[in-house]
Amino acid sequence: MLAPIELDGGSEFVEKEVLKSLRLLTQKLYLRNPQEFRKQGLETPHVATAKLFNQLEHWSDSPMKDLDWQENFKLSFVEDYPGDRVHTYMSALLTMIMASYEHKQTFFFCDALDAQKLYNSARNIETAVWKLSNAKFPTGQQYLLTNTMDDLVDNLSFEREFGKLIADQDLMALIIEGKNNRVISRIVTSAASFIFLPI
């Protein structure tokens, strides 16, 4: 009789925390930038956020699985882009992170995650966050409002959530590195270059 394959609860737990952070960040971006979800004809930040994350329920068949996430990141900051910038930016982030987990949400101990992909995804998040905070229209206005000096508490909570997201991906990379006994290539990139590492 074959022994049952055990679930890898640790990987699932970390990924769930990462997806929870992504959902919260999406809602925060929509709250700061309500004009974006209205471009889709949607009425609330909650509805717009749900529309994106409902894709996870059928991810293997979702067109988002094959999204060119690097192109979507760049599209978010094209001056005359007419679409929903929050959806475009966060769908890129979601797809890139799902790729770092091999597009899975359930894991068994026989499943092999790639520590390098997880590490690279953390560096890519840093690059994407830098761009989000610094990209501006020629007028000087940010493409997407994030941090403001007017509301320090909310400002810090926004930064904390992105920081938690990066830390979770780095933690997962270290766990898998130790488990597989394969050393991560710790590549240093400049966030300002807006160049992403492969996943």
Image (tube, grey):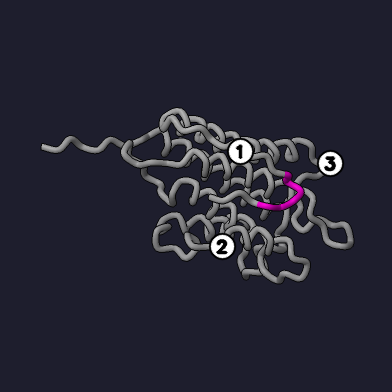
Magenta-colored stretch includes residue 164: no
Say which residue label 1 marks.
166
- Whether residue 123 is visible, yes or no, is yes
Q: Which residues are magenta?
A: 190-195
- Whether residue 44 is visible, yes or no, is no
Say which residue label 3 marks.
149
- Spatial distance from mark 2 to mark 1, Cα to Cα? 21 Å
| Crowd band around label 1 with a 10 angstrom C-alpha radius: few (<14), some (14–19), many (20+) | many
Q: Secondary structure at mark 1?
A: helix
Question: From the viewer's perspective, is the residue at label 1 or at label 3 nearer?
Answer: 1
Q: Amino acid at mark 1?
A: Ile
Going 42% across and 41% down the picture, which residue do you hit?
113
Q: Secondary structure at mark 3?
A: loop
Q: Nearer the viewer, residue 109 or 28?
A: 109
Residue 160, quarter of picture: top right
Q: Is residue 169 above or below residue 88?
A: above
Q: Nearer the viewer, residue 25 or 74?
A: 74
- Spatial distance from mark 3 to mark 2, Cα to Cα? 34 Å
Question: From the viewer's perspective, is the residue at label 3 or at label 2 nearer?
Answer: 2
Sequence order check, earlier mark of 1 and 3 = 3
Say which residue label 2 marks.
68
The percent coordinates of residue 140 (x first, y second) are 88, 57
| Crowd band around label 2 with a 10 angstrom C-alpha radius: few (<14), some (14–19), many (20+) | few
Going 68% across and 64% down the picture, which residue do you hit?
75
Q: Amino acid at mark 3?
A: Met
